[in-house]
Amino acid sequence: MTTAPPFANEPVLELRRAPVRARLADVLRDHDGRGPLAVPVWVGADQRTGDALVSTDPGAPERVVARAAAATQADVDAALDAAAAGHRDWGRRPAAERAAVLMRAAAWLREHRLEVAALEVRECAKPWPEADGDVCEAIDFLEYYSRGAVALEAGADLLQLPGERNTLSYRPRGVVAVISPWNFPVAIPCGMVAAGLATGNAVVLKPAEQAPGCAYVLVRALREAGVPADALALLPGEGEVGVALVRDPRVHTIAFTGSSQVGQEIVRTAAETPPEQAHLKRVIAEMGGKNCVIVDADADLDEVVPALVQSAFLYAGQKCSAAARVLCHEAVHDGLVERLGGAVEVLAVGQAERLDIDVPAVIERSAQERVARYAGEAERTGRLAATARSVPDGGWFATPALAVDLPPDSPVLHEEIFGPLLAVQRVRDVEDACDQVDASPFGLTGGLFARNPDTVDYVVDRSPVGNLYVNRAITGAMVGRQPFGGNRLSGTGTKAGGPGYLLQFVEARVVTENTMRHGLVV
Ligand SMILES: NC(=O)c1ccc[n+]([C@@H]2O[C@H](COP(=O)([O-])OP(=O)(O)OC[C@H]3O[C@@H](n4cnc5c(N)ncnc54)[C@H](O)[C@@H]3O)[C@@H](O)[C@H]2O)c1
Protein backbone atom coordinates (compact mmCIF):
# COMPACT_ATOMS: atom_id res chain seq x y z
CA MET A 1 0.00 0.00 0.00
CA THR A 2 2.89 2.36 0.72
CA THR A 3 3.70 1.97 -2.95
CA ALA A 4 0.21 2.92 -4.16
CA PRO A 5 0.51 5.73 -6.68
CA PRO A 6 -1.03 9.08 -5.75
CA PHE A 7 -4.78 9.25 -6.19
CA ALA A 8 -6.05 10.18 -9.66
CA ASN A 9 -9.62 10.24 -10.94
CA GLU A 10 -10.69 7.26 -13.03
CA PRO A 11 -10.86 8.35 -16.69
CA VAL A 12 -14.33 8.29 -18.21
CA LEU A 13 -15.10 6.44 -21.44
CA GLU A 14 -14.26 8.16 -24.71
CA LEU A 15 -17.77 8.03 -26.06
CA ARG A 16 -16.85 10.11 -29.10
CA ARG A 17 -15.09 7.00 -30.49
CA ALA A 18 -17.32 4.78 -32.61
CA PRO A 19 -15.83 1.45 -31.39
CA VAL A 20 -16.51 2.44 -27.77
CA ARG A 21 -20.10 3.29 -28.61
CA ALA A 22 -20.52 0.01 -30.48
CA ARG A 23 -19.42 -1.94 -27.39
CA LEU A 24 -22.13 -0.26 -25.34
CA ALA A 25 -24.83 -1.59 -27.63
CA ASP A 26 -23.38 -5.14 -27.33
CA VAL A 27 -23.17 -4.91 -23.56
CA LEU A 28 -26.75 -3.68 -23.27
CA ARG A 29 -27.97 -6.51 -25.51
CA ASP A 30 -26.18 -9.03 -23.28
CA HIS A 31 -27.59 -7.34 -20.20
CA ASP A 32 -31.16 -7.54 -21.50
CA GLY A 33 -30.60 -11.15 -22.59
CA ARG A 34 -29.79 -12.19 -19.03
CA GLY A 35 -33.23 -11.13 -17.73
CA PRO A 36 -34.04 -9.66 -14.33
CA LEU A 37 -31.35 -9.72 -11.67
CA ALA A 38 -32.21 -11.62 -8.47
CA VAL A 39 -31.18 -9.46 -5.53
CA PRO A 40 -30.93 -11.18 -2.16
CA VAL A 41 -31.05 -10.04 1.41
CA TRP A 42 -27.41 -10.88 2.07
CA VAL A 43 -26.33 -11.38 5.65
CA GLY A 44 -23.13 -13.26 6.40
CA ALA A 45 -23.06 -16.27 4.08
CA ASP A 46 -26.86 -16.39 3.78
CA GLN A 47 -28.58 -15.09 0.69
CA ARG A 48 -32.36 -15.02 0.59
CA THR A 49 -33.93 -14.04 -2.72
CA GLY A 50 -37.51 -12.91 -3.22
CA ASP A 51 -39.65 -10.53 -5.20
CA ALA A 52 -41.07 -8.12 -2.65
CA LEU A 53 -39.30 -5.28 -4.51
CA VAL A 54 -39.45 -5.12 -8.29
CA SER A 55 -37.30 -2.51 -9.97
CA THR A 56 -38.25 -1.54 -13.49
CA ASP A 57 -36.80 0.57 -16.29
CA PRO A 58 -38.15 4.13 -15.81
CA GLY A 59 -38.09 4.63 -19.59
CA ALA A 60 -40.03 1.41 -20.25
CA PRO A 61 -41.70 0.37 -16.99
CA GLU A 62 -42.84 -2.96 -18.39
CA ARG A 63 -39.19 -4.06 -18.41
CA VAL A 64 -38.30 -5.66 -15.07
CA VAL A 65 -34.65 -5.03 -14.21
CA ALA A 66 -34.35 -6.65 -10.80
CA ARG A 67 -36.42 -8.57 -8.28
CA ALA A 68 -35.27 -8.17 -4.72
CA ALA A 69 -36.14 -9.70 -1.40
CA ALA A 70 -37.09 -7.15 1.25
CA ALA A 71 -35.36 -7.30 4.61
CA THR A 72 -37.49 -8.11 7.66
CA GLN A 73 -36.84 -7.09 11.27
CA ALA A 74 -35.27 -10.56 11.71
CA ASP A 75 -32.85 -9.77 8.85
CA VAL A 76 -31.98 -6.41 10.43
CA ASP A 77 -31.27 -8.21 13.71
CA ALA A 78 -29.13 -10.85 12.01
CA ALA A 79 -27.18 -8.24 10.04
CA LEU A 80 -26.50 -6.13 13.13
CA ASP A 81 -25.50 -9.15 15.23
CA ALA A 82 -23.08 -10.20 12.49
CA ALA A 83 -21.71 -6.67 12.17
CA ALA A 84 -21.37 -6.25 15.93
CA ALA A 85 -19.08 -9.29 15.94
CA GLY A 86 -17.54 -8.74 12.51
CA HIS A 87 -16.22 -5.25 13.04
CA ARG A 88 -13.75 -6.44 15.66
CA ASP A 89 -11.62 -8.59 13.37
CA TRP A 90 -11.94 -6.25 10.38
CA GLY A 91 -11.17 -3.21 12.54
CA ARG A 92 -8.05 -4.84 13.99
CA ARG A 93 -6.51 -5.38 10.58
CA PRO A 94 -3.95 -2.81 9.46
CA ALA A 95 -5.47 -0.09 7.31
CA ALA A 96 -3.17 -1.11 4.45
CA GLU A 97 -4.67 -4.60 4.45
CA ARG A 98 -8.20 -3.22 4.32
CA ALA A 99 -7.12 -0.79 1.62
CA ALA A 100 -5.79 -3.63 -0.50
CA VAL A 101 -9.22 -5.30 -0.32
CA LEU A 102 -11.04 -2.10 -1.31
CA MET A 103 -8.64 -1.53 -4.18
CA ARG A 104 -9.42 -5.03 -5.41
CA ALA A 105 -13.10 -4.02 -5.36
CA ALA A 106 -12.15 -0.97 -7.44
CA ALA A 107 -10.38 -3.30 -9.88
CA TRP A 108 -13.53 -5.49 -10.02
CA LEU A 109 -15.65 -2.46 -10.93
CA ARG A 110 -13.07 -1.39 -13.53
CA GLU A 111 -13.19 -4.82 -15.10
CA HIS A 112 -17.01 -4.88 -15.13
CA ARG A 113 -17.57 -1.19 -15.74
CA LEU A 114 -19.66 -1.53 -18.88
CA GLU A 115 -21.96 -4.17 -17.41
CA VAL A 116 -22.44 -2.10 -14.26
CA ALA A 117 -23.14 1.01 -16.35
CA ALA A 118 -25.64 -0.97 -18.45
CA LEU A 119 -27.48 -1.93 -15.27
CA GLU A 120 -27.67 1.77 -14.32
CA VAL A 121 -28.97 2.66 -17.78
CA ARG A 122 -31.82 0.20 -17.24
CA GLU A 123 -32.53 0.43 -13.53
CA CYS A 124 -32.29 4.21 -13.10
CA ALA A 125 -32.52 5.54 -16.69
CA LYS A 126 -29.00 6.94 -16.36
CA PRO A 127 -27.81 7.97 -19.81
CA TRP A 128 -24.54 6.23 -20.76
CA PRO A 129 -22.18 9.13 -20.02
CA GLU A 130 -23.79 9.59 -16.61
CA ALA A 131 -23.82 5.87 -15.86
CA ASP A 132 -20.17 5.56 -16.81
CA GLY A 133 -19.35 8.63 -14.70
CA ASP A 134 -21.13 7.03 -11.75
CA VAL A 135 -19.04 3.84 -12.00
CA CYS A 136 -15.87 5.95 -12.27
CA GLU A 137 -16.88 7.91 -9.17
CA ALA A 138 -17.46 4.67 -7.27
CA ILE A 139 -13.93 3.55 -8.22
CA ASP A 140 -12.63 6.95 -7.13
CA PHE A 141 -14.24 6.65 -3.70
CA LEU A 142 -12.66 3.22 -3.15
CA GLU A 143 -9.23 4.42 -4.20
CA TYR A 144 -9.43 7.75 -2.37
CA TYR A 145 -10.72 6.48 0.98
CA SER A 146 -8.30 3.54 0.96
CA ARG A 147 -5.40 5.94 0.80
CA GLY A 148 -7.04 8.29 3.30
CA ALA A 149 -7.55 5.54 5.88
CA VAL A 150 -3.91 4.50 5.67
CA ALA A 151 -2.86 8.12 6.27
CA LEU A 152 -5.35 8.42 9.16
CA GLU A 153 -3.96 5.31 10.84
CA ALA A 154 -0.65 7.12 11.27
CA GLY A 155 -2.42 9.46 13.71
CA ALA A 156 -1.36 13.09 14.04
CA ASP A 157 1.69 14.83 15.48
CA LEU A 158 1.26 16.30 18.94
CA LEU A 159 3.47 18.53 21.01
CA GLN A 160 5.86 16.42 23.12
CA LEU A 161 7.57 17.55 26.34
CA PRO A 162 10.46 15.78 28.07
CA GLY A 163 9.21 12.88 30.20
CA GLU A 164 5.88 12.72 28.43
CA ARG A 165 4.71 10.85 25.35
CA ASN A 166 1.45 11.91 23.70
CA THR A 167 -0.15 9.88 20.95
CA LEU A 168 -3.32 10.43 19.00
CA SER A 169 -4.86 7.54 17.13
CA TYR A 170 -8.13 6.96 15.36
CA ARG A 171 -10.18 3.83 15.96
CA PRO A 172 -13.20 2.54 14.08
CA ARG A 173 -16.49 3.45 15.73
CA GLY A 174 -18.04 -0.01 15.20
CA VAL A 175 -21.17 -0.58 13.10
CA VAL A 176 -22.13 1.79 10.29
CA ALA A 177 -25.63 1.80 8.79
CA VAL A 178 -25.52 3.17 5.25
CA ILE A 179 -28.83 4.41 3.80
CA SER A 180 -28.56 5.50 0.19
CA PRO A 181 -30.64 7.13 -2.58
CA TRP A 182 -31.18 5.93 -6.15
CA ASN A 183 -29.82 8.83 -8.18
CA PHE A 184 -26.13 7.83 -8.07
CA PRO A 185 -27.01 4.18 -7.55
CA VAL A 186 -23.48 2.77 -7.32
CA ALA A 187 -21.26 5.76 -6.47
CA ILE A 188 -23.17 7.12 -3.48
CA PRO A 189 -23.64 3.83 -1.60
CA CYS A 190 -20.09 2.93 -2.60
CA GLY A 191 -18.68 6.14 -1.13
CA MET A 192 -20.40 5.73 2.22
CA VAL A 193 -19.69 1.98 2.43
CA ALA A 194 -16.05 2.43 1.38
CA ALA A 195 -15.49 5.13 4.00
CA GLY A 196 -16.94 2.89 6.70
CA LEU A 197 -14.96 -0.17 5.67
CA ALA A 198 -11.67 1.61 4.99
CA THR A 199 -11.66 2.95 8.54
CA GLY A 200 -12.32 -0.52 10.01
CA ASN A 201 -16.06 -0.51 10.67
CA ALA A 202 -18.57 -3.17 9.70
CA VAL A 203 -21.26 -1.86 7.35
CA VAL A 204 -24.92 -2.70 6.84
CA LEU A 205 -26.20 -1.24 3.57
CA LYS A 206 -29.87 -0.32 3.05
CA PRO A 207 -30.03 0.85 -0.56
CA ALA A 208 -32.84 2.78 -2.25
CA GLU A 209 -35.86 0.65 -3.08
CA GLN A 210 -35.71 1.93 -6.68
CA ALA A 211 -32.19 0.58 -7.29
CA PRO A 212 -31.55 -2.70 -5.45
CA GLY A 213 -29.77 -4.22 -8.47
CA CYS A 214 -27.04 -1.58 -8.50
CA ALA A 215 -26.46 -2.00 -4.76
CA TYR A 216 -26.21 -5.77 -5.15
CA VAL A 217 -23.50 -5.41 -7.77
CA LEU A 218 -21.56 -3.12 -5.46
CA VAL A 219 -21.78 -5.57 -2.56
CA ARG A 220 -20.70 -8.39 -4.87
CA ALA A 221 -17.65 -6.39 -5.91
CA LEU A 222 -16.68 -5.82 -2.27
CA ARG A 223 -17.37 -9.37 -1.11
CA GLU A 224 -15.51 -10.91 -4.06
CA ALA A 225 -12.61 -8.57 -3.35
CA GLY A 226 -12.31 -10.04 0.14
CA VAL A 227 -14.50 -8.00 2.51
CA PRO A 228 -15.43 -10.58 5.18
CA ALA A 229 -19.02 -11.82 5.20
CA ASP A 230 -19.66 -10.42 8.68
CA ALA A 231 -18.27 -6.98 7.81
CA LEU A 232 -20.76 -6.15 5.07
CA ALA A 233 -24.47 -6.96 4.76
CA LEU A 234 -27.04 -5.96 2.15
CA LEU A 235 -30.59 -5.23 3.31
CA PRO A 236 -32.80 -4.21 0.38
CA GLY A 237 -36.14 -2.77 1.39
CA GLU A 238 -38.33 0.29 1.72
CA GLY A 239 -37.88 3.13 4.18
CA GLU A 240 -38.94 1.06 7.20
CA VAL A 241 -35.71 -0.97 6.97
CA GLY A 242 -33.86 2.34 7.29
CA VAL A 243 -36.05 3.29 10.26
CA ALA A 244 -35.18 0.01 12.00
CA LEU A 245 -31.46 0.58 11.49
CA VAL A 246 -31.58 4.19 12.65
CA ARG A 247 -33.36 3.23 15.90
CA ASP A 248 -31.17 0.26 16.72
CA PRO A 249 -28.75 0.65 19.65
CA ARG A 250 -26.20 -1.64 17.95
CA VAL A 251 -25.56 1.04 15.29
CA HIS A 252 -22.79 3.56 16.02
CA THR A 253 -22.75 5.64 12.85
CA ILE A 254 -25.43 6.41 10.28
CA ALA A 255 -24.32 7.53 6.84
CA PHE A 256 -27.36 8.78 4.97
CA THR A 257 -27.83 10.46 1.61
CA GLY A 258 -31.31 11.41 0.50
CA SER A 259 -34.06 13.94 0.99
CA SER A 260 -33.91 16.67 3.60
CA GLN A 261 -37.14 15.49 5.18
CA VAL A 262 -35.88 11.95 5.79
CA GLY A 263 -32.45 13.21 6.83
CA GLN A 264 -33.92 15.46 9.49
CA GLU A 265 -36.06 12.63 10.80
CA ILE A 266 -32.94 10.45 11.04
CA VAL A 267 -31.03 13.16 12.91
CA ARG A 268 -33.90 13.46 15.43
CA THR A 269 -34.31 9.70 15.96
CA ALA A 270 -30.60 9.03 16.20
CA ALA A 271 -30.26 11.59 18.99
CA GLU A 272 -32.10 9.26 21.37
CA THR A 273 -30.05 7.13 23.76
CA PRO A 274 -32.11 4.17 24.99
CA PRO A 275 -30.80 2.59 28.24
CA GLU A 276 -29.11 -0.31 26.42
CA GLN A 277 -27.11 2.08 24.17
CA ALA A 278 -23.82 3.19 25.71
CA HIS A 279 -22.83 5.63 22.98
CA LEU A 280 -24.05 8.62 21.01
CA LYS A 281 -24.82 7.86 17.39
CA ARG A 282 -23.10 9.97 14.81
CA VAL A 283 -25.09 10.98 11.76
CA ILE A 284 -23.61 11.94 8.43
CA ALA A 285 -26.51 13.29 6.39
CA GLU A 286 -26.16 14.55 2.82
CA MET A 287 -29.49 15.97 1.79
CA GLY A 288 -31.43 17.87 -0.84
CA GLY A 289 -31.40 21.51 -1.80
CA LYS A 290 -32.77 24.24 -4.01
CA ASN A 291 -29.69 25.17 -5.94
CA CYS A 292 -29.51 28.77 -7.12
CA VAL A 293 -27.40 30.26 -9.88
CA ILE A 294 -26.81 34.02 -9.90
CA VAL A 295 -26.34 35.66 -13.30
CA ASP A 296 -24.92 39.18 -13.22
CA ALA A 297 -25.48 41.83 -15.90
CA ASP A 298 -21.99 41.40 -17.35
CA ALA A 299 -22.17 37.59 -17.65
CA ASP A 300 -21.37 36.06 -21.01
CA LEU A 301 -24.68 34.49 -22.05
CA ASP A 302 -22.91 32.30 -24.60
CA GLU A 303 -21.35 30.62 -21.60
CA VAL A 304 -24.35 30.85 -19.28
CA VAL A 305 -26.99 29.18 -21.46
CA PRO A 306 -25.21 25.85 -22.15
CA ALA A 307 -23.93 25.67 -18.57
CA LEU A 308 -27.44 26.20 -17.18
CA VAL A 309 -28.99 23.70 -19.56
CA GLN A 310 -26.40 21.14 -18.55
CA SER A 311 -26.82 21.88 -14.83
CA ALA A 312 -30.62 21.85 -14.84
CA PHE A 313 -31.58 19.17 -17.35
CA LEU A 314 -28.87 16.52 -17.50
CA TYR A 315 -30.20 13.34 -15.93
CA ALA A 316 -33.59 15.12 -15.96
CA GLY A 317 -32.60 17.45 -13.13
CA GLN A 318 -32.27 14.51 -10.72
CA LYS A 319 -28.81 15.31 -9.41
CA CYS A 320 -28.72 16.72 -5.92
CA SER A 321 -26.43 19.43 -7.30
CA ALA A 322 -28.72 20.36 -10.23
CA ALA A 323 -29.58 23.99 -10.92
CA ALA A 324 -33.20 24.70 -9.96
CA ARG A 325 -33.48 28.46 -9.64
CA VAL A 326 -31.73 31.22 -11.59
CA LEU A 327 -31.51 34.69 -10.06
CA CYS A 328 -30.84 36.88 -13.04
CA HIS A 329 -29.94 40.59 -13.12
CA GLU A 330 -32.91 42.51 -14.53
CA ALA A 331 -30.74 44.03 -17.27
CA VAL A 332 -30.20 40.64 -18.93
CA HIS A 333 -33.24 38.73 -17.65
CA ASP A 334 -35.36 38.87 -20.81
CA GLY A 335 -32.44 38.02 -23.08
CA LEU A 336 -31.48 35.05 -20.94
CA VAL A 337 -35.07 33.76 -20.80
CA GLU A 338 -35.39 33.99 -24.55
CA ARG A 339 -32.18 32.10 -25.18
CA LEU A 340 -32.74 29.52 -22.47
CA GLY A 341 -36.27 29.03 -23.78
CA GLY A 342 -34.92 28.26 -27.23
CA ALA A 343 -32.55 25.68 -25.76
CA VAL A 344 -35.25 24.05 -23.64
CA GLU A 345 -37.64 23.69 -26.59
CA VAL A 346 -35.16 21.58 -28.53
CA LEU A 347 -34.01 19.35 -25.69
CA ALA A 348 -34.10 15.74 -26.88
CA VAL A 349 -36.11 13.68 -24.42
CA GLY A 350 -35.81 9.92 -24.82
CA GLN A 351 -34.53 6.55 -23.70
CA ALA A 352 -31.38 6.56 -21.58
CA GLU A 353 -29.67 4.01 -23.83
CA ARG A 354 -29.64 6.46 -26.75
CA LEU A 355 -26.54 8.58 -27.07
CA ASP A 356 -28.40 11.38 -28.85
CA ILE A 357 -30.72 12.34 -25.99
CA ASP A 358 -30.41 15.13 -23.45
CA VAL A 359 -33.12 14.19 -20.95
CA PRO A 360 -34.14 10.64 -19.91
CA ALA A 361 -37.24 9.54 -18.00
CA VAL A 362 -37.52 10.43 -14.33
CA ILE A 363 -37.19 7.62 -11.83
CA GLU A 364 -40.83 6.71 -11.17
CA ARG A 365 -44.46 7.64 -11.68
CA SER A 366 -44.66 9.72 -8.50
CA ALA A 367 -41.67 11.80 -9.71
CA GLN A 368 -43.37 12.37 -13.06
CA GLU A 369 -46.52 13.49 -11.23
CA ARG A 370 -44.55 15.75 -8.90
CA VAL A 371 -42.86 17.58 -11.77
CA ALA A 372 -46.22 17.98 -13.54
CA ARG A 373 -47.76 19.37 -10.33
CA TYR A 374 -45.05 22.04 -9.98
CA ALA A 375 -45.28 22.86 -13.70
CA GLY A 376 -49.04 23.35 -13.26
CA GLU A 377 -48.41 25.63 -10.29
CA ALA A 378 -45.92 27.65 -12.38
CA GLU A 379 -48.45 27.97 -15.19
CA ARG A 380 -51.22 29.07 -12.82
CA THR A 381 -49.25 31.64 -10.86
CA GLY A 382 -46.59 32.64 -13.39
CA ARG A 383 -45.71 31.49 -16.88
CA LEU A 384 -44.00 28.58 -18.60
CA ALA A 385 -41.72 30.41 -21.01
CA ALA A 386 -40.77 27.19 -22.78
CA THR A 387 -41.31 23.46 -22.70
CA ALA A 388 -39.56 20.71 -24.67
CA ARG A 389 -41.38 20.19 -27.98
CA SER A 390 -41.37 16.46 -28.05
CA VAL A 391 -41.72 14.08 -25.10
CA PRO A 392 -42.20 10.34 -25.63
CA ASP A 393 -45.14 8.41 -24.18
CA GLY A 394 -44.79 5.18 -22.34
CA GLY A 395 -42.11 5.77 -19.71
CA TRP A 396 -41.98 8.13 -16.75
CA PHE A 397 -41.03 11.10 -18.91
CA ALA A 398 -41.44 14.58 -17.46
CA THR A 399 -41.60 17.56 -19.79
CA PRO A 400 -38.54 19.81 -19.44
CA ALA A 401 -39.77 23.33 -18.76
CA LEU A 402 -38.67 26.87 -17.98
CA ALA A 403 -40.79 28.78 -15.44
CA VAL A 404 -40.72 32.58 -15.16
CA ASP A 405 -42.68 35.50 -13.65
CA LEU A 406 -43.42 33.56 -10.47
CA PRO A 407 -44.59 35.27 -7.28
CA PRO A 408 -41.75 35.60 -4.73
CA ASP A 409 -43.30 33.04 -2.38
CA SER A 410 -43.97 30.46 -5.10
CA PRO A 411 -43.14 26.87 -4.03
CA VAL A 412 -41.59 26.50 -7.49
CA LEU A 413 -38.90 28.92 -6.34
CA HIS A 414 -38.36 27.46 -2.90
CA GLU A 415 -38.99 23.71 -2.82
CA GLU A 416 -36.83 20.93 -4.23
CA ILE A 417 -38.64 19.56 -7.30
CA PHE A 418 -35.96 17.08 -8.39
CA GLY A 419 -36.94 17.06 -12.03
CA PRO A 420 -36.42 18.96 -15.30
CA LEU A 421 -38.07 22.24 -14.29
CA LEU A 422 -35.91 25.36 -14.07
CA ALA A 423 -37.24 28.64 -12.65
CA VAL A 424 -35.78 32.00 -13.62
CA GLN A 425 -36.32 34.99 -11.41
CA ARG A 426 -35.58 38.67 -12.05
CA VAL A 427 -33.40 40.39 -9.41
CA ARG A 428 -32.36 44.03 -8.96
CA ASP A 429 -28.66 43.23 -8.63
CA VAL A 430 -26.21 40.71 -7.21
CA GLU A 431 -26.78 41.97 -3.66
CA ASP A 432 -30.51 41.32 -4.02
CA ALA A 433 -29.70 37.84 -5.38
CA CYS A 434 -27.40 37.09 -2.42
CA ASP A 435 -30.12 38.23 0.02
CA GLN A 436 -32.55 35.78 -1.56
CA VAL A 437 -30.06 32.91 -1.53
CA ASP A 438 -29.32 33.70 2.10
CA ALA A 439 -33.03 33.49 2.94
CA SER A 440 -33.17 29.85 1.78
CA PRO A 441 -32.98 27.08 4.38
CA PHE A 442 -30.94 25.01 1.93
CA GLY A 443 -27.22 25.29 1.26
CA LEU A 444 -26.08 22.56 -1.11
CA THR A 445 -24.69 23.92 -4.38
CA GLY A 446 -24.80 27.29 -6.04
CA GLY A 447 -23.46 29.08 -9.06
CA LEU A 448 -22.39 32.48 -10.23
CA PHE A 449 -21.82 33.92 -13.67
CA ALA A 450 -20.03 37.28 -13.47
CA ARG A 451 -16.97 38.84 -15.07
CA ASN A 452 -16.02 41.35 -12.41
CA PRO A 453 -13.58 39.79 -9.90
CA ASP A 454 -14.97 42.03 -7.13
CA THR A 455 -18.43 40.60 -7.75
CA VAL A 456 -16.98 37.09 -7.58
CA ASP A 457 -15.31 37.89 -4.24
CA TYR A 458 -18.53 39.42 -2.91
CA VAL A 459 -20.64 36.38 -3.79
CA VAL A 460 -18.03 33.91 -2.54
CA ASP A 461 -18.05 35.76 0.77
CA ARG A 462 -21.84 35.79 1.10
CA SER A 463 -22.60 32.36 -0.27
CA PRO A 464 -23.78 29.85 2.35
CA VAL A 465 -23.63 26.78 0.10
CA GLY A 466 -21.31 23.82 0.47
CA ASN A 467 -20.20 23.91 -3.18
CA LEU A 468 -20.14 27.12 -5.18
CA TYR A 469 -19.24 27.03 -8.87
CA VAL A 470 -18.14 30.20 -10.63
CA ASN A 471 -18.57 30.67 -14.38
CA ARG A 472 -19.24 26.99 -15.06
CA ALA A 473 -21.89 24.30 -14.72
CA ILE A 474 -22.77 23.47 -11.13
CA THR A 475 -22.85 19.66 -11.37
CA GLY A 476 -20.14 17.04 -11.76
CA ALA A 477 -18.11 17.26 -8.53
CA MET A 478 -15.04 15.04 -8.73
CA VAL A 479 -13.59 13.04 -5.83
CA GLY A 480 -10.47 14.73 -4.49
CA ARG A 481 -11.06 17.85 -6.59
CA GLN A 482 -14.41 19.14 -5.40
CA PRO A 483 -15.17 17.56 -2.01
CA PHE A 484 -18.95 17.56 -1.96
CA GLY A 485 -21.64 18.25 0.61
CA GLY A 486 -24.16 20.81 1.78
CA ASN A 487 -24.72 23.16 4.68
CA ARG A 488 -27.89 24.31 6.48
CA LEU A 489 -30.75 21.82 5.93
CA SER A 490 -28.84 20.32 3.02
CA GLY A 491 -26.37 18.41 5.11
CA THR A 492 -24.28 17.94 8.19
CA GLY A 493 -21.40 19.72 6.51
CA THR A 494 -19.17 16.74 5.84
CA LYS A 495 -17.51 16.66 2.46
CA ALA A 496 -17.66 13.37 0.57
CA GLY A 497 -14.51 12.80 -1.46
CA GLY A 498 -12.55 15.27 0.65
CA PRO A 499 -9.81 15.15 3.26
CA GLY A 500 -11.93 15.35 6.43
CA TYR A 501 -14.64 12.87 5.51
CA LEU A 502 -13.15 9.77 7.13
CA LEU A 503 -12.99 11.48 10.52
CA GLN A 504 -16.74 10.94 10.76
CA PHE A 505 -16.23 7.18 10.84
CA VAL A 506 -13.64 7.00 13.60
CA GLU A 507 -13.19 8.04 17.19
CA ALA A 508 -10.04 9.76 18.36
CA ARG A 509 -8.08 8.44 21.31
CA VAL A 510 -5.23 10.27 22.99
CA VAL A 511 -2.80 8.47 25.27
CA THR A 512 -0.44 10.41 27.52
CA GLU A 513 2.32 8.40 29.15
CA ASN A 514 4.73 9.47 31.83
CA THR A 515 8.04 8.17 30.45
CA MET A 516 10.13 9.09 33.54
CA ARG A 517 10.19 5.52 34.77
CA HIS A 518 11.64 4.85 38.22
CA GLY A 519 13.05 1.42 37.55
CA LEU A 520 11.52 -1.41 35.58
CA VAL A 521 9.20 -4.08 36.94
CA VAL A 522 10.37 -7.44 35.62
N1 LIG B 1 -26.45 16.00 -0.76
C1 LIG B 1 -26.14 14.97 -1.50
O1 LIG B 1 -24.98 14.61 -1.64
C2 LIG B 1 -27.23 14.21 -2.20
C3 LIG B 1 -26.87 13.26 -3.16
C4 LIG B 1 -27.87 12.53 -3.81
C5 LIG B 1 -29.19 12.75 -3.51
N2 LIG B 1 -29.52 13.69 -2.58
C6 LIG B 1 -30.92 13.95 -2.29
O2 LIG B 1 -31.64 12.71 -2.23
C7 LIG B 1 -32.99 12.90 -2.62
C8 LIG B 1 -33.37 11.89 -3.67
O3 LIG B 1 -33.15 10.59 -3.21
P1 LIG B 1 -34.31 9.66 -2.63
O4 LIG B 1 -35.59 9.96 -3.32
O5 LIG B 1 -33.81 8.26 -2.68
O6 LIG B 1 -34.38 10.17 -1.11
P2 LIG B 1 -35.22 9.57 0.10
O7 LIG B 1 -34.93 10.43 1.28
O8 LIG B 1 -36.63 9.35 -0.26
O9 LIG B 1 -34.60 8.10 0.33
C9 LIG B 1 -33.24 7.90 0.61
C10 LIG B 1 -33.07 6.59 1.38
O10 LIG B 1 -33.68 6.71 2.66
C11 LIG B 1 -34.57 5.61 2.88
N3 LIG B 1 -35.63 6.08 3.79
C12 LIG B 1 -36.85 6.59 3.46
N4 LIG B 1 -37.51 6.94 4.58
C13 LIG B 1 -36.70 6.65 5.63
C14 LIG B 1 -36.80 6.83 7.03
N5 LIG B 1 -37.89 7.36 7.59
N6 LIG B 1 -35.77 6.46 7.81
C15 LIG B 1 -34.65 5.92 7.26
N7 LIG B 1 -34.48 5.75 5.92
C16 LIG B 1 -35.50 6.10 5.12
C17 LIG B 1 -35.03 5.25 1.49
O11 LIG B 1 -35.58 3.95 1.48
C18 LIG B 1 -33.74 5.39 0.71
O12 LIG B 1 -32.91 4.27 0.87
C19 LIG B 1 -33.05 14.34 -3.12
O13 LIG B 1 -33.59 15.14 -2.11
C20 LIG B 1 -31.59 14.69 -3.38
O14 LIG B 1 -31.32 16.06 -3.34
C21 LIG B 1 -28.57 14.41 -1.92
Image (cartoon, helix red, strand yellow):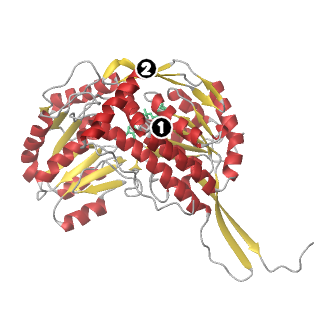
Left or right: residue 382 versus residue 251 is left
Helix, strand or loop under label 2: loop
Q: Which residue is mark 2?
A: 35
Q: Which residue is mark 1?
A: 180
- Percent position of residue 205, x then y: 55, 36
Please state the horizontal and vertical placement of residue 427, each as a whole percent of the image: 15, 50
Say left or right for 62 vs 166. left
Q: Is residue 146 above or below residue 164?
A: above
The residue lying furthest to the right in this view is 522
In this rendering, position of residue 364 left or right of residue 314: right
Identify the image quadrant of the C terminus: bottom right
Q: Is residue 183 above or below residue 516?
A: above
Which residue extends farthest bottom?
Answer: 162
Q: Quadrant for residue 20, please give it.
A: top left
Tell me if mark 1 has few (under 14), some (14-19) or many (20+) residues whose alpha carbon lies within 10 angstroms of its own: many
In depth, the one of 405 and 84 nearer the eye is: 84
> Quarter of the image containing the N terminus?
bottom right
**Which residue is drawn at the image coordinates 66% and 31% (left, top)?**
45
Q: Is residue 128 above or below residue 73?
A: below
Viewer-proximal residue among 153 and 206: 153
Q: Position of residue 458 (x, y in %)?
A: 24, 64
Please state which of residues 159 and 128 is positioned toward the viewer in this rendering: 128
The image quadrant of residue 400 is top left
Q: Give the residue type at disc 1.
A: Ser
Identify which residue is drawn at 70% across, 35% down: 81
Q: Looking at mark 1, is its residue's CB closer than 8 Å to ligand 1? A: yes
Sequence-first tag of 1 and 2: 2
Q: Is residue 134 visible?
A: yes
Q: Is residue 473 left or right of residue 54?
A: left
Disc 2 within 8 angstroms of ligand 1 (CB): no
